[in-house]
Amino acid sequence: MERALTDPQEFQVFSKKLFDDVDTDKSGSVNRRELRHVLNAVSQALGKPLPTENEIETLMITLDADRDGKINFQEFQDLAKVILETLASK
Ligand SMILES: [Ca+2]
């Protein structure tokens, strides 16, 4: 998985797979419920406290560059990068 940090092609594969996993209703975008779900899973994997609703809201606003209330694949890649770096540095 660490290769995805340095290899853009590997990163594409990693982020696409993660996006598909997170987008459980296969709508093509990630809503707040799905975002909360993945953040909870990552927090649990790291043994950290679960994110608060405020933190989820803030992240949602930060990621949602086109302000349509959903995170599309383009927008999701920023989060995928953070998740990858976090898990890799564990
Ligand atoms: Ca969006």
Image (cartoon, grey):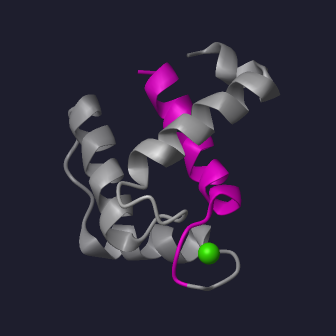
Q: Is residue 30 above or below residue 81?
A: below
Q: Farthest bottom residue?
A: 68
Residue positioned 52% across, 47% down in the render: 19
Question: Where the N terminus falls, by quadrant?
Answer: top right
Quarter of the figure with residue 33 = bottom left
Q: Farthest front residue?
A: 26
| Front-lying residue, 79 or 24 | 24
| Front-lying residue, 59 or 1 | 1
| Front-lying residue, 7 or 22 | 22
Left or right: residue 5 versus residue 86 is right
Q: Is residue 4 magenta?
A: no
Q: Is residue 88 magenta?
A: yes
Quarter of the figure with residue 64 = bottom right
Q: Is residue 72 above or below residue 15?
A: below
Q: Is residue 51 above or below residue 6?
A: below
Left or right: residue 1 versus residue 49 is right
Residue 63 location (% of width, % of height): 59, 67
Residue 3 location (% of width, % of height): 67, 14
Residue positioned 53% across, 36% down in the render: 17
Residue 16 location (% of width, % of height): 60, 40
Residue positioned 60% across, 85% down in the render: 68
Total number of numbered labels?
0
**What predominant SS class does the magenta segment belong to?**
helix
Q: Farthest right residue?
A: 8
Residue 24 location (% of width, % of height): 35, 54
Name the quadrant where ligand 1 sits: bottom right
Residue positioned 49% across, 39% down in the render: 18
Region of the chain picked out in magenta, as a range: 69-90
